[in-house]
Amino acid sequence: MPTTLDCSRSRTRSGTADPIDEAERLIQTEITRAIQTVKNEHDTAVQAEKTLTSAVGAAKADVADLGRKSVDYNVMEREAKSNHAVYDTLLQQEKELRVSSNSRANNVRIVDLAEIPKSPMTPAGRRTWLMSVAIGLALAVSVAFGLDYMNDTIKTPEDVNQRLKQPFLGLVPVPARVTAKVPGRSWDWRVGLVTFRHRVTPEPGGALVGVDIEAPAALEPLLRVSYGPVVAALVRNLARVADRNAPD
């Protein structure tokens, strides 16, 4: 029995291929084909995945762009509605103005018909000359009265009582002359036997005014009593004039 089996196996090797080897070869071929098919399907799936990923990215970008465009569209839609409302308002006002202008009564009427002059018009030379003279005289008189009103110098004895508030004793026609002068500081003048020396000393916020009198002993006390208030009144008057003319 064992010898027969060995002989038959020996014959099989020498005659045809072994079925087991053929089956293994077929199995290996199928396995290789299946592996190749699976690999091809895997590559196809990977490529499809990449394509789908790219499509999803593009779709996401489109969605984001659509969102931005939606915001812009909403803004433009609101502006369009606002412009349309303004247009409707203006159109309504234009219609109201048109109706008002058509219904307004015309209040223009002819008072008198114009006539074409028969001769050229000439300027009224005499009337113009007389009017110019009258206006010039009126302005001259106004200026004269104005200057006289603004002139606050002492010209008459009454001005002494009115402006200086001092009694007027009288006029003494005695010749006077200036004997010495320092501009802005002092000046001396002499009347008969009397010499007056006026001094101005600048001080912060103003100036100090002083008067020295040289006169006979009998006249000096009287001059100090009478001339001192006059100088004080003149200084006050000058101070008021300076304050009035000082720039702001």
Image (cartoon, rainbow, N blue to C red):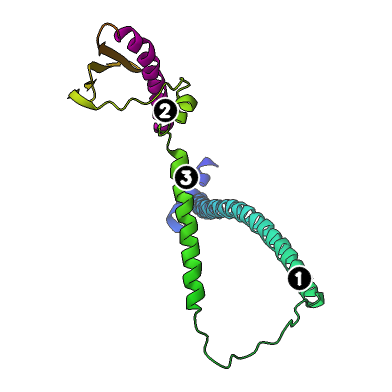
Residue at image point 50% right, 84% down:
122
Disc 2 designates what residue?
243
Q: Which residues are magenta?
A: 219-248
**Sequence-first tag of 2 and 3:** 3
Residue at image point 74% right, 83% down:
110
Q: Could you tell me if the residues under marks 2 and 1 are in contact, i.e. CB atoms within 8 Å?
A: no
Q: Nearer the viewer, mark 2 or mark 1?
A: 2
Q: CA distance from mark 2 to mark 3?
A: 20 Å
* Residue 214 position (above or below residue 6): above
Disc 3 designates what residue?
146
Residue at image point 75% right, 78% down:
108
Residue at image point 45% right, 58% down:
15
Q: Is residue 112 left or right of residue 182?
A: right
Q: Quadrant of the N terminus?
A: top right
Asked if residue 162 shows in the view, the reply is yes
Within 10 Å of disc 2 (Cα), the crowding (few <14, some 14-19, many 20+) is few
Within 10 Å of disc 3 (Cα), the crowding (few <14, some 14-19, many 20+) is few
Q: Residue 35: percent from the left, percent from the top?
A: 51, 50
Q: Is residue 232 magenta?
A: yes
Q: Quadrant of the C terminus?
A: top left
Q: Residue 45: percent from the left, percent from the top?
A: 55, 52
Asked if residue 182 shows in the view, the reply is no
Disc 1 designates what residue?
97
